[in-house]
Structures are given as structure tokens and as C-alpha cells.
Image (tube, helix red, strand yellow):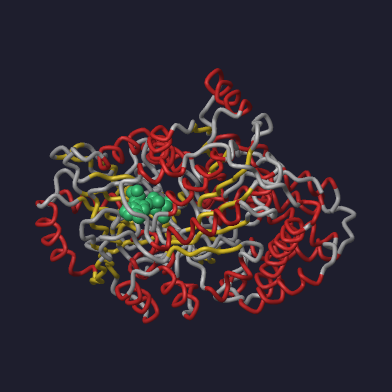
Amino acid sequence: MRKELFDFLNTDLQFVKGVGPVLASRFDDVLGGRRVLDFMLHVPSYVRARGVTECVADGVAGETLTIPLLVKSHRRGGFFRGRRAPTQVVCADKTGATVVLQFFNTRFLDYWLEKLPIGAWRMVSGKLEKSARATINHPDFIEEMQNAGKIPQTQAIYPSGEGLTQKTFAAVRDQIFAALPDKMMGETDSDTREFFDALAHVHYPADDADLAPNSKYIVKLAYWELLAHQTAIAISRRNRHDPRNRRTVRPQKYNLLEKFYATLPFDLTGAQKRTIDDIFADMSADVPMMRLVQGDVGSGKTIVALAAAVRMAEFGAQTAMLAPTDALAMQHYAKLKTMCDKIGIVCDILTGRDKGASRREKLISLRSGRTRLVIGTHALFSDDVEYRDLGLVIVDEQHRFGVTQREALRAKGENPDMLALSATPIPRTLSMTIYGDMDVSIINEKPAGRLPIITTKLPTSRIADLVARLKSQIAAGAKVFWVCPLVDDSDDNGAAAATARYEYLREFFPTAGLVHGQMDKKQRDATMAQFADNDSDMSILVATTVIEVGIDVPRATIIVIENAEQFGLAALHQLRGRVGRGNAQSYCILLYGKSTSENGMRRLSVLCETDDGFAIAEQDLMMRGTGELIGTRQSGWINYHFADWREHRDLFRLASAAARDMDVPTPWARDLMFIFNRRTQLGA
Ligand code: ADP
Ligand code: MG
């Protein structure tokens, strides 16, 4: 591929007109990268029609309504009995029927009200809620009548995130795809042309069929994505077994494991012991270890990883543990540091937050070899980070990292051992193709005394019964996570729905808390911390899924998932893992809506019947009809952009065979590896 095109794909989104550093980092959160290319690989989830309806009576509840409205009055929200009420703009359609526009966020209130002057007609577009009266929460578009044409007739809806609107997505997309032909000038390679042509169709879909798993564009892109992945695996496998990469096995210098086992407050499970045996055997072989440890949330993977780090310290060498987010890195560090202190291993943390003198000190300690275990984010493989003798790289939640990233960290040592941890149970039939270059250990046993989470399903209409049940549980000391779905297509990402639910629950539980993506981050962190605090009386935390509820809250034994039918099995299973971490009995209540499909009900039944991630993954593989789910590709077991192992099983096989057949990767396969490797800036 030509340099100009490469440079364009590598461009940081902050340099796209109208984006800037703040939006770019928000995109980073959603896209898992901040290059133009990362945006291009982000597929819309569906197409929304926005034709104009003249009378609100013709609108369908729950669907998008575009309608001319006359603004009648503003009712500013204020505090009412100690509670913040939403601001309402009361309007009328041409028949005089009332439509209320509601705004929950007070920060941008003046902005909204200026766009809606009293006495003026405006074209308004947003999701219609019909309860007592027609309401639109946070309209997507408000235009003066002469600009009504600016509201698109059809709109590709992107899976969104905090602080990003569909309008922003559309604007960035338009700029990127307008610049593309110019960057492709002189590009004669037909694969490249076909690739970007397929991408353009996906970003400007005519209808939902263009985005379906069997659309010719998606199939093409999925195959290429899999080919990229399989080629990388083939290369990595070849490298590992290359005789030139044989290593001399390190001699043991210190005795630390006995102390380590003696300080453990519990007995290891059989599965943990077996996994540790697998790992230690690999660590004394002359081929570097490449092992994946799979086990459900709470199965005790961290201790297993720590055992490996302790073993490496016995060799006098270092271990780097890579976590996907700052928060997870800090959580690991807090736990592992105490254990390391007890056995005299120097443990440190390094994230993007470390700056200046403290960072320099940390780097010196790493370079000298004094730090034996370092936990961190991708800051661990920044250019200026040097290790004295990096012997082991541990990657937590490995599906979030690309093969290339893994290799970048590996390059910091000399053929170091690799250990990946994953809570993502991939069906056995597929783990060979997906993790083809790795040996796998499975922790399929929960620590003793752990009770299975009791899971039940309940129609949302019976919410009052649930509240009554919760009251007695909370009185007995339980804490409750209440998850409201991320609404893919609303620009507030479900903040309004969560706020409404919070208001409802506060009637019964005055100490409830609320976190959503529209809130100030400081306030949000404070609320989360308050909920996690054992001594606080905050009993219920209402949260949207935008919020990482990954924090450990030992007293949280109940999780309620609203509109559970809209989630995939993988997402539900992972959410459920927020509870059941201690020895108390935990519960998961799946609330479902009136119009839940048969498939939706089947998914919920699977969850009620089993707690075993592998069994759930097998069921997931057999079920189809994932199209109805929100954020399907993102919340699955493994994050591909285009490929879905439920829908594209034959493509997996084809790509795997094609990659194995290549003695040397073709130039196009190399290009594909560049395209599909996240967060890399490789030039060729
Ligand atoms: P994972 O990373 O697999 O989700 P963790 O390693 O974080 O799980 O372990 C979950 C909890 O279980 C931790 O508090 C850990 O200390 C505890 N734990 C791990 N192994 C055992 C065991 N064999 N017996 C009892 N508790 C354990
Ligand atoms: Mg873990």
C-alpha cells in the first residue's frame, strides 16, 4: 500500500477538522484506538429512517419521529423536594396536540433553550416516548424550518459512547470518506480498492441488509479481518518454533514459592494447581511459553498469574503485567502489592498517569532490575521503558489486545514467556482457530464455598414485586447493582432512561446512587467509591452499561439487569459476574420488556439454567438471530470488527487454511495485518 494512504490511515483523529484532542480521546474509548483507520473499522449497527411525520398521533412509541413543532413554553427544571426535575419545553404539532421535549442535563440548558424560542416553529427529530403524553427526551436534531433538509432521511447509527453524538459520528465519517479518493490516487491494487469500496458501503448503508452478517460487504471484510488475524498467528507460531529462537533455561537463584504458598489465605483449587503446573513446565522449556489461561470471572486467575511472576522472580528476572484500563491496573496492583510485600518481591505500577520525577524513578527501578513485577497499561511498552531482564509478560483480558501489541511488549525482553488471561470462554471447537498459536489451560472450577448465582427472569411489569423483595434484602445488608441498557441510538446513551429509573427507585430507597456517561467524571467516581465503600449506606447503584462497573464491591450480592433481552449472552454473563465474588448467596434478576422475542426469552433461560461460561458459550454458538441485540459485535465473546463466529464459521475455516498455505505472507496479507492490528503505527 502506498505511503500516502498509510499516512492518512495512521492520522490521529484529533487532526480531523472539528475533532480536536478532547473528542479524539472520547473516540479512543469507543473505538479502541484514535486513528482515522480505527474510525473506519467501526461499523454502524443499523439504519434509521427519519421521514417527516406531520401529526404526533401518527408517531409510533419507541421509534424515531421527525416532526414540525410550535414552541409554546419553557419550564425550567429545578429542585423539587430536594430532587432535580428535568427541564421541559412544551410544544404543539399542527393539530395542536402537545409534545413535550425533555432535557435532563442542565449543563447545556441555555444552548437548548436558545434553539427553541417560544412562538417559533422548529423541525424536531428524536425518539418518541409515549406514556401519559408524547415526549421526546434530548432530541437528536432541532432545526429551523428552512434548514429541515439538514436532517437526514436515513441515518446510519453507530455504536456510541460517552460524550459522542450521532451527528459527530456522521460529520467525522463524511470528512474521512470525502478525503479517501484523493489518498487512494494512483492506487491500482484491486484488493485495496475493493476493501475501501466495501468499507464505504458499510458506512453509507442503503438499508439494514447492507449491515447484516451475510451482506456481501460484511462477508468480504470479515474474511479479510480473519485472514489478517490468522496470518499473524501463523507468523507468531513459526517464530516461536524457529530453532534460532531456542533459549537457554534460566537457573533458579532464589527460593520464594514456598513462602508464597504459605502466605495464601486459602487452598488453591485443583484447576488452579493444574494450571500452575502447566505454566511452570513451560517456563523451564527451551521454547518460550505461549499460554492462555481461560476461566470465568472469579475463578482465581490472578493468583495463578502471580505464581508465575513469583517463579520468574526465583530466576531473578522480571514480569510485566498488562491490563486493559488504568482502573483494572490499579485494582490488580492494590491486591498483588500486599502479597508481594509479604514475600519480599518489589512490585510497582506504571500507567499513563505517571509523569515527571515519580515516573523517572519507576523507570530507573525497572532498568536496574530491582522492580520484579510491574503492573500497568500500554505505558509498559512505551519507547523509554527498559527492563533489565524481562522474562515474563502477562496479558489480562487478552482479547482486548492485538497480536502486534503483544509482540511489542515481548520485544522488550529476549524471547520472554507469554501468559494471557481471559474470562472469555470460547467454545472448544473454535479456540484452536482463534488462539491457534497458544496452548490453553482452563480453570473450570470455582473456589470452594462459592455458591452459584441464582438467576431469575421477570417481566418489567412486575417491578413492584421486585422492589418489595429488594427492600428486605437491603435491610439485611445487601447492595444492589441496577443496570440500565446502553441505548445504542440515543445520543445520551441511556442517561435519560437511567435517570428516570433512579427517580423511581428513590421513592423506595432514598440512598440510591446514579452513574451515567453524561455525568461529570469526578461526581461519578465519587458515587462509585461511595457505593463500593463498605460502611456507606448507599444500597442501590443505578448505572448505564457505559459505565465500567468493574469495581469490586464485596457486599454487592444482587444485580438487576433491565431490558436484559437486548443483551447478548456474553454481555449478560459478564455483567452477572459483578456479583457472586464472595461466599454469600448472590442473585441476578433479568427484567424483560413486553415485546421480547422468542430468541430473547431463550437467551434468558440459558442464563437462568447455568452459571458455567463454557456451557453458555456453546449455547451462544448454536443460537442465531444476534441482529436484534445492541452493540452485538462489541459485546461478544471476542471483539472482531466484522467477523462473528456465530455467523461466519466457514470464513474462519477458509481464512485459517489460507494463512497456513502461505509460506511467506503476501503483500496484501501484510497490509491486512497492518489494518487490523489495533493501536499500532506500523509503516509496512
Ligand atoms: P479472576 O481474575 O479469575 O476473575 P481473581 O483471581 O480476581 O479471579 O479471584 C477472585 C477472588 O477469589 C479473589 O478475591 C481471590 O483472592 C479469591 N480466590 C482465588 N483463588 C481462590 C481459592 N482457591 N480459594 C478461595 N478464594 C480464592
Ligand atoms: Mg481478573
Task: Work out which quarter of the rendered image holds the N terminus and state it.
Answer: bottom right
Give residue 634's position: percent from left, percent from top: 51, 60
Q: How many labels does the image show?
A: 0
Front-most of residues 52 and 342: 342
Q: Residue at x 29, y 64 (%)?
A: 130
Pick whichever, 521 or 622, lies toward us: 622
Residue 405 can be seen, yes or no: yes
Q: Considering only vertical position in the picture, is 246 above or below 17?
A: below
Quarter location, residue 371: top right
Asked if residue 103 lies left or right of residue 614, the reply is left
Q: Is residue 328 left or right of residue 549?
A: right
Furthest residue to the top?
357
Q: Name the image quarter holding residue 271.
A: bottom left
Q: Which residue is drawn at 62% across and 65% down?
A: 642
- In the rendered view, tell whether residue 324 sits above or below residue 459: above
- What residue sits 9% from the left and 57% below the top? 472
**Residue 155 visible in rendering:** no
- In the rendered image, residue 452, in percent from the top left (x then y), is placed at 28, 66
Whether 406 is drawn above or below 468: the answer is above
Is 145 or 373 nearer to us in this picture?
Answer: 373
Q: Is residue 580 left or right of residue 600?
A: left
Horizontal arrangement in the rendering, residue 606 relative to residue 45 (left or right)? left
| Front-lying residue, 410 or 508 | 410
Residue 74 placement (x, y as % from top left): 29, 42
**Residue located 81% across and 52% down the image:** 244
